[in-house]
Amino acid sequence: MVHVPSLPQPQRIVLAELSGVAGRYGNGSDRDRPRDEALAAVRSVTTDARLLGIQAGVAMADPLGISGPTVELLKAAGADMQVAAEHAAEVRARLESQGTRYDEQAE
């Protein structure tokens, strides 16, 4: 789930769709589909580097450490990885404040 209340609602809706598409092609049911198909699917949702970066940050903050393929997909689609790193830190801090623990190997 993407929690970015500072964004306008239309951008939050795009992030919700992007979350589903990127997750499906990164780690989900379509993970074995051709890379160009995955990139096209992600880019059909958005080509906004900032939004791609926010979603990459969510994936980077995955406490199980299994979302690497999703991060790589979003990076290849044009994610701003500085935004991703900043958002990942925010997400981790929020999760840790709620009691989520990170395995050293997951980071």
Image (cartoon, rainbow, N blue to C red):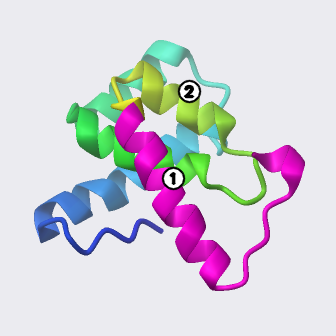
Label 2 neighbour load within 10 Å: few <14, some 14-19, many 20+: some
Q: Callout 1, which amino acid?
A: Ala
User: Picture quarter containing residue 4?
Assistant: bottom left
Residue drawn at point x = 57 percent, y = 37 percent: 70
Residue drawn at point x = 45 percent, y = 32 percent: 74
Mark 2 = which residue?
A: 72
Is 80 situated above or below 63? above
Kindly report the secondary structure that dominates the magenta region of the rendered protein: helix
Of marks 2 and 1, which one's residue comes earlier in the chain? 2
Disc sitting over residue 9 in the figure: none
Is 82 situated above or below 60? above
Q: If the image is split into quadrants, where does the C terminus sit?
A: top right
Q: In the image shown, does 18 or 84 lie closer to the viewer? A: 84
Residue drawn at point x = 20 percent, y = 70 percent: 6
Question: What segment is highlighted magenta in the picture?
Answer: 82-107
Mark 1 = which residue?
A: 88
